[in-house]
Image (spheres, helix red, strand yellow):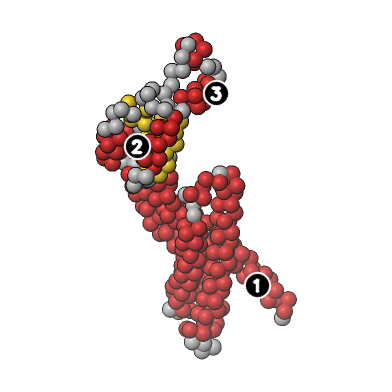
Amino acid sequence: MGKRHQPTRRRQGMQAVTLCISTTMVLVLLGLVVLSVLTTRNLSDYVRENLTVTVMLSDSVTAKDGIALGKKLQKQHYAKEVTYISKEQALKEQTEAMGSDPSEFLGVNPFVATLEMHMYADYANADSLKKIVRQIKKNRQQVTDVAYQEDLTERVNFNLQRMSIVLLVLAVLLIIVSYSLISNSVRLDIYSRRFSIHTMKLVGASWGFIRWPFLKRAIGIGLVASLLSCGVLGGGIYALYTFEPAAFQIVGVTELVITALAIFIAGFFIMLFCTFISVNKFLRMTAGEIYKI
């Protein structure tokens, strides 16, 4: 008798493993989209705050005055970071970049001292930057010009807004697809055990009694698949941090916790709901209907 049930148990075990793997893959994709949606704002802020506004200083401004002006700008509510670049430092950086010293054939240092300013994300937009530039240019004795990539700023803002919309639509579509894939996998698993369900009905078992083992199994598979999905995503994020430490500014702890919760909630409720619906479907079937399918 035990040998007779051994192949059945082995088959059910393989079905559970297959269902767990397929659910894990779906939850990993769902987690990636949720994480992408959550980090869009951080990515937008990161890109905006790395846009450089260059304040060009006149030749009459000494290093001391330039540093003082930088500190003054640093105190402004819109400035995140202001760095003073002397003429000598600018020449050195350009020489390293070009591989030759421009002052050797020009006879003079062609560069001017500058202040490189990074704005807070809320002010790194076209309208705010225009007002800030006008305000800085009022200091005509020390400032000769203020330059920034206006087209790039507008392009970045437009592309980030469009990416946010695309990710939200993709998230909704993936939730629907995830439900469909997990639902089909659950139905196939329960379909293979439809005769067991019918046998329990014949001996007088209540629907709740019949459903419970399936629901308990679904909860277990959902939790295991969620843990595996979080492990896969966690490994990927760790590798990303190792390769690029600055990624921590975009993918933070809050986003990771929310993504993990979303995966567990999706894995738990989708598995539970799909199993409940599928078991009820076979519970409502008569013997003739079960043998026909």
Is label 1 in a helix, a strand or a loop?
A: helix
Q: Position of residue 84 (x, y in %)?
A: 44, 33
The residue labelled by disc 1 is: 8
Which residue is located at x 61 percent, y 64 percent? 17
Q: Nearer the viewer, residue 51 or 160?
A: 51
Q: Is residue 118 left or right of residue 88?
A: left
Which residue is located at x 46 percent, y 79 percent? 283
Q: CA distance from mark 2 to mark 3?
A: 27 Å
Q: Residues within 10 Å of mark 1 (few under 14, many from 20)?
A: few
The residue labelled by disc 2 is: 153
Q: Residues within 10 Å of mark 3 (few under 14, many from 20)?
A: few
Q: Nearer the viewer, residue 169 or 156?
A: 156
- Observer-side mark, 3 or 1, equals 3
Q: Nearer the viewer, residue 184 or 8?
A: 184
Task: Mark 3 or mark 1: name the one nearer the start of the chain.
Answer: 1
The residue labelled by disc 3 is: 96
Q: Is residue 139 above or below residue 256?
A: above
Task: Mark 2 or mark 3: name the one nearer the start of the chain.
Answer: 3
Q: CA distance from mark 3 to mark 1?
A: 72 Å
Q: Residues within 10 Å of mark 2 (few under 14, many from 20)?
A: some
Residue that sits furthest to the bottom in the current view: 204
Which residue is located at x 53 percent, y 17 percent? 101
Q: Quadrant of residue 19?
A: bottom right
Q: Position of residue 136 (x, y in %)?
A: 30, 35
**Amino acid type of disc 2?**
Thr
